Image (cartoon, grey):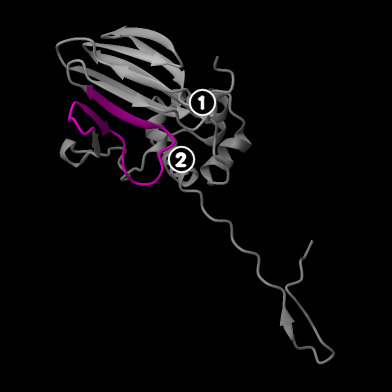
Amino acid sequence: MNIPTGFLDSSGSVPFSLPKREQQNNDPIAERISQNLRRLRDKHQLSVDALAQASGVRRALIAQIESGRSQPSIKVLCKVASVLKVSIAELLVPSDGHGVLLLPAQHSKREINAAGTVVHRALHPEQGEPLVAFFELRLSPHAEAHAPGHDPCVQKHLVVAQGSLELNINEEHFVLQAGDSILFRAEQPHSYRNPLDSEAVAYLVTSPAHERMA
């Protein structure tokens, strides 16, 4: 159906026009996923149909994601990333076009507490608002860090790489050793404590919470 953009008067001229519809603002996350998905699909020489069949994601949805008209769920990203043999993060981070983005340690954003005993370092690119964020957490001997709670739509996945961490979540107490991991909803008040006489190192990923997560 043709939509009129103005009205003719008796002379055939257009005395006024209907306002043009505003173009939809680009979603930076959707655009980033779109670019990375096209790049990775081309790298693996997969058609949209082949990717849809291998991932179990509808062809129409993949086409919408690649055009930047749809922001996929974590579940959909997992299916697509699995077929493309990459992590979800590679679909989310800005790309230089070669699938590699170097993040020098000296350029990382760090948050350090007043006592200098807790260092929270971002390991993801600073451009834009990341859908999935990755951090390094370092606690000096017997240091503590407290978090009052975050957005209810966010979850945290923490893994201890060195030493030991005591984690209190909503009055529940957990003790994690090196290699242990834990997943929890971030809206709950929580705190970290290093009980040992040596430094503790952990890695933390924040991402959209799964609806059915207990």
The amino acid type, in three-letter code, at marker 2 is Ile
- Looking at the image, is mark 2 or mark 1 earlier in the sequence? 2
What stretch of residues is rendered in magenta? 113-138
Report the residue at 32% width, 9% height from top: 180
In x, y percent, where is residue 5? 73, 73
- Name the one closer to the observer, 63 or 74: 74
Q: Is residue 47 left or right of residue 1?
A: left
**Residue 209 circle label:** 1
Magenta stretch holds residue 124: yes
Magenta stretch holds residue 66: no
Report the residue at 18% width, 38% height from top: 104
Residue position for label 2 = 33
In x, y percent, where is residue 80? 49, 28
In terms of image quadrants, where is residue 107?
A: top left
In x, y percent, where is residue 16? 73, 82
Q: Residues within 10 Å of mark 2 (few under 14, many from 20)?
A: many
Q: Is residue 151 left or right of residue 9?
A: left
Instruction: Give me the C-alpha separation between circle 2 and circle 1.
Output: 19 Å
